[in-house]
Image: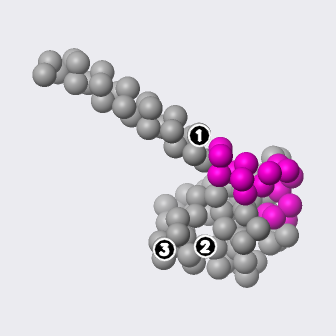
Amino acid sequence: MDDRLERVIRQQLRKAGKQFEEAKRAYAEAKADPEGNGENARRYGLATDDEGRARIVCRRHAERRAVAVDDEGRPTCFEDGHPDCEGCAEDVRDGVAESW
């Protein structure tokens, strides 16, 4: 395969992957906080941004994130079965999640 064609295909696949992840995240946030008012984030005592999303530090990726929180205290980036995500959700429910 021509190097240029391969590079273009890789770029387009990367772009499609990013769009898919953004759509998936937006869907999860809308599902977690349908009213868009950040009620769950405040219920668990988390700092919020202007849009009502919880401002937490991700244990798994060690980065700041602004995410919606569902009724069960799980951030939208939560992955079931991952130890860091499970610990983060427990911290959110206990009100001790690291925030910024």
Quarter of the figure with the N terminus: top left
- Residue type at numbered disc 3: Gly
The x and y percentages for residue 64 are: 61, 56
Q: Which residues are magenta?
A: 26-42
Residue found at x 66% / y 63%:
75
Q: Determine if residue 51 is in view.
A: yes
Is 35 displayed left or right of 55 in the figure?
Answer: right
**Against 14, is 85 above or below?**
below
Element type where label 1 sits in the image: helix
Residue 3, image quadrant? top left
Task: Please report whichever mark, 3 or 2, sits nearer to the chain's N-terminal start.
Answer: 3
Disc 3 residue crowd, few under 14, some 14–19, many 20+, Cα 10 Å = few
Looking at the rendered structure, which numbered label has been put on residue 88?
A: 2
| Of pointers 3 and 1, the one earlier in the residue sequence | 1
Q: Which residue is mark 1?
A: 23
In percent of width and height, residue 54 lies at 74, 59
Q: Which residue is mark 3?
A: 81
